[in-house]
Amino acid sequence: MAVLRWVVAVVASVAAFFVVAVPWAVLSSGGHDPWEVIGPVGGVVAAGVLAALGWWASQASAPAGGGAERIVRQSARAKGNIRQTAGSDGAAGRAGRRPMRESIRQKGRGGGDVDQVGGDRA
């Protein structure tokens, strides 16, 4: 599905260039090389179309509004051992179901051991 979206984005971008450039070239009176102006303007329009449709195409692989998403950011400093878990470490937890949408940010410091869990751990 994502490949098809990218093909649509690129084809629409090329089509946008020609929609701007061809009528302008046909209607221009000639004189100096009109493509010195037509080319860059058509390129800007095509780049704008590609940017908008490129964003749309990149959303094909993103999770849906209520989809599963887990973002975990952890940092720790300690003189002892550091153990960080960013998901299910041996826990069945929500087996068979999609994980809840969550965003976890943890920072830890200590003189001894640091143990951070960014999800379920048994």
Image (cartoon, helix red, strand yellow):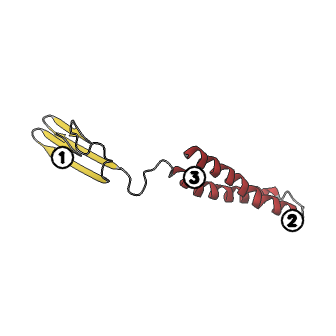
Q: Which residue is mark 1?
A: 108
How far across and how far down the image is residue 62, in percent?
45, 50
Disc 1 crowd rating (10 Å Cα; few below 14, some 14-19, many 20+) is some
**Count of all numbered marks drawn on residues in the image:** 3
Secondary structure of the residue carrying tag 1 is strand
How far across and how far down the image is residue 66, in percent?
38, 56
Image position of 39 with respect to 89: above or below: below
Q: Amino acid at mark 2?
A: Leu
How far across and how far down the image is residue 20, in percent?
76, 61
Q: Amino acid at mark 1?
A: Gly
Q: Residue furthest front?
A: 96
Secondary structure of the residue carrying tag 2 is helix
**Among the two numbered marks 3 and 2 on one chain, the one whose residue lies closer to the N terminus:** 2
**Among the two numbered marks 1 and 3 on one chain, the one whose residue lies closer to the N terminus:** 3
Q: Which residue is mark 3?
A: 54
The numbered mark at residue 27 is 2
* Mark whose residue sits in front, 1 or 3: 3
Q: Are marks 2 and 1 in contact (CB under 8 Å)?
A: no
Secondary structure of the residue carrying tag 3 is helix
Q: Quadrant of the C terminus?
A: top left
